[in-house]
Image (spheres, rainbow, N blue to C red):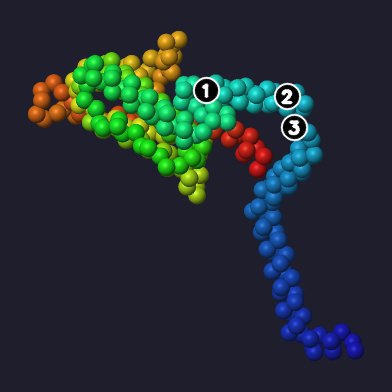
Amino acid sequence: MDMNDYWQENKRFLVTLGSGFLVFVIGLFVVQSLYGSDLSTAKRLRNRNRGDLNAERYSAAHRDEASDENDALRAAIDVLSQATAFQPRPGFVVEPGGSPSGTYFTRVEEVREDLDLLASRRRMNYPDGWGIEMLETNNLPEIERRLEALDLLERVARLAAESGVDRISRIVVKLDPGFGSRGGLGALERTSVTFSLLSSAESVTDLIVASQEPASDEGSGGPLAIGQFSVENERNKIGSVKADIEFQVVRVKRDLSDEEAGQ
């Protein structure tokens, strides 16, 4: 078959093929003219980044510096944790081998007796039983937290009497909502002990100031964390206020960073 016959038989196909090739070439020139420089720049960046990936960016000195900074941060976290976390006094800790419930009941009776006597001397009114709950459990973690709350309660009640507070109308103890829940506890655990007071503004102020005193050899455990606070004038008594002060037993989960690093 000669070329003339082939052309006659396949003229439409050849024209279509040639037109498509021509459009492709024209498009290629258009793309090259519009985006050629950008493509060249992108290729150079790609090649350079490939080279950077193969090169070692950090030396042993960099790793040692990062390790030192990490150690310093951990030390700072330990210092802040110790400053923030509540430190219970020896009498409010379950001793190894001791009975958790027995320790709690003993301390409750002692605290009630001591506070009753102090309040009587200072002529301060207080709620029956000082808002202390008698537990029906021997669960060590819960009793440990209840003992810490009892320690805080005793400290604040004593400070209130010494500050001249006229009346403690209510005391409410609440464990952290995460304790015993499915979600669990976070990095900070807070047990709240809320005092509702009726007294002069001066005595309430003195109580708050006294609660922030540093630790002393006389048995003071140091500053007490305060959460929510509200105060309003008492309507029927000039110069008196109603105040709700939430003190907190703060527990810090110090090994949180270690657990996260191991995950």
Report whether 221 appears left or right of 58. Answer: left
Residue 99 visible in this rendered orientation of the protein: yes
Residue located farthest toward the right when viewing the structure as drawn:
1
Q: Residue at x 58, y 35 (%)?
A: 256
* Residue 155, percent from left and from top: 36, 21
Circle 3 residues within 10 Å: few <14, some 14–19, many ≥20: few
Which residue position holds label 1? 82
Q: Please state which of residues 38 and 170 is positioned toward the viewer in this rendering.
A: 170
Q: Is residue 216 placed above or below 149 in the rendered structure?
A: above
State yes or no: discs 1 and 2 in contact (Cβ < 8 Å).
no
At mark 3, the secondary structure is: loop
Q: In front of the other: label 1 or label 3?
A: 1
Q: Is residue 38 above or below residue 142?
A: below
Amino acid type of the residue tagged 1 in the rendering: Gln
Which of the two labelled residues, at mark 1 and mark 2, occupies the earlier sequence position?
2
- Residue type beneath disc 2: Asp
Q: CA distance from mark 3 to mark 2?
A: 14 Å
Is residue 160 shown to the viewer in this render? no
Res. 194 mark: none
Where residue 9 appears, as percent x and y from the top left, is 80, 89
Question: If the image is split into quadrants, where does the N terminus sit?
Answer: bottom right
- Describe residue 167's horizontal placement relative to residue 183 as left or right: left
Residue type at the position of mark 3: Arg
Could you tell me how far apart the alpha carbons at marks 1 and 2 are, in whole angstroms? 27 Å
51 or 11, nearer to the observer: 51
Residue 64 numbered mark, or none: 2
Q: Give the image quarter of residue 75.
A: top right
Which type of secondary structure does the marked residue at label 2 adopt? helix
Mark 3, residue position: 57
Residue at horizontal 52%, vertical 25%?
Answer: 81
